[in-house]
């Protein structure tokens, strides 16, 4: 009798675990198609500039944003009064935005711009376009650089002339005002470091 009860108990436990695993995999598979993702941007430089990775020891032409298993979600933290960046967006594990670091060598200084800004959605493209002003990008090292991606181009600010490599930390996040319709979106743009116009 005890063996029969034990066998039934083990069968129930194993069946329950099997359903949990299958359910988790299925929901993760479905959710994958609702995530908001940011593609790694190509970087374009003026002739006298060079771009390096975060450690400054390798030349690169593309930034690699951190990955979020659930994709971008609207931020919950309050915006910093000086930078306009939410306090929950940073360059550490657990950030509510994605981030990428690089070192730029710009001996004459540089303006930082985003171009070719695109929002690709699998559905509700018109409604997604209306939410563009709730998606923000900033460079941590440039004061008041936070701008929305409302238009096809965005100006993030200016880096001073320097004979040293300068660290740049790019943040991308969704405003707390972002609506529920904003899902299944791929955000892409190119980054341009250009000479400062006289």
Image: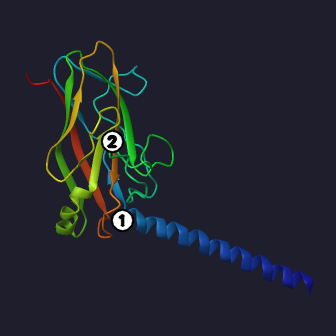
Q: Could you say which is closer to the camera, residue 78 or residue 56?
A: 78
Q: Is residue 86 left or right of residue 108?
A: right
Q: Is residue 105 left or right of residue 152?
A: right
* Residue 101 image point, x, y percent: 38, 33
Please name which of the two marks, 2 or 1, marks the residue nearer to the observer.
2
Q: Could you say which is closer to the camera, residue 29 or residue 56?
A: 56
The secondary structure type at the circle numbered 2 is loop
Mark 1 is surrounded, within 10 Å at the Cα level, by few (under 14), some (14 to 19) or many (20 or more) other residues, namely some
Residue at image position (19%, 52%) is: 118
- Report the disc number at residue 83: 2
Mark 2 is surrounded, within 10 Å at the Cα level, by few (under 14), some (14 to 19) or many (20 or more) other residues, namely some
Coloring scheme of the render? Answer: rainbow
Residue at image position (40%, 28%) is: 54
* Residue 145 image point, x, y percent: 26, 39
Q: Could you say which is closer to the camera, residue 77 or residue 44?
A: 77
Q: Please determine whether, in this image, residue 183 is positioned above or below residue 111.
A: below
* Residue 78 image point, x, y percent: 40, 54
Q: CA distance from mark 2 to mark 1?
A: 30 Å
The picture quadrant where one finds residue 55 is top left
Q: Could you say which is closer to the camera, residue 10 or residue 162?
A: 162
- Report the disc number at residue 81: none
Q: Please determine whether, in this image, residue 186 is positioned above or below residue 159.
A: below
Q: Which residue is mark 1?
A: 34
Q: Is residue 151 left or right of residue 175?
A: left
Residue at image position (25%, 37%) is: 42
- Of all residues, the one furthest to the top in this rendering is 163
Q: Please determine whether, in this image, residue 27 is positioned above or below residue 196.
A: below
- Of all residues, the one furthest to the left in this rendering is 198
> Which quadrant would the N terminus be assigned to in this image?
bottom right
The secondary structure type at the circle numbered 1 is loop
């Amino acid at each position: 009798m005890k063996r029969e009860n034990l066998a039934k108990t083990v069968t129930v436990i194993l069946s329950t675990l099997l359903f949990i695993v299958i359910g988790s995999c299925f929901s993760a598979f479905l959710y994958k198609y609702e995530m908001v993702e940011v593609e790694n941007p190509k970087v374009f430089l003026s002739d006298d500039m060079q771009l390096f990775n975060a450690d400054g020891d390798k030349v690169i032409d593309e930034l690699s944003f951190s990955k979020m298993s659930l994709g971008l979600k609207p931020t919950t933290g309050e915006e910093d009064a000086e930078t306009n960046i939410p306090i929950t967006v940073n360059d550490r594990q657990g950030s509510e935005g994605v981030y990428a670091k690089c070192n730029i060598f710009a001996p004459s200084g540089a303006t930082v711009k985003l171009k070719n800004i695109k929002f690709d959605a699998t559905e509700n493209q018109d409604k997604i376009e209306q939410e563009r002003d709730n998606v923000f990008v900033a460079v941590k090292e440039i004061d008041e650089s936070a701008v929305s991606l409302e238009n096809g181009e965005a100006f993030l600010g200016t880096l001073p002339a320097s004979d040293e490599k300068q660290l740049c930390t790019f943040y991308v996040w969704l405003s707390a005002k972002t609506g529920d319709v904003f899902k299944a979106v791929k955000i892409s743009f190119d980054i341009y470091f250009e000479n400062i116009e006289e």
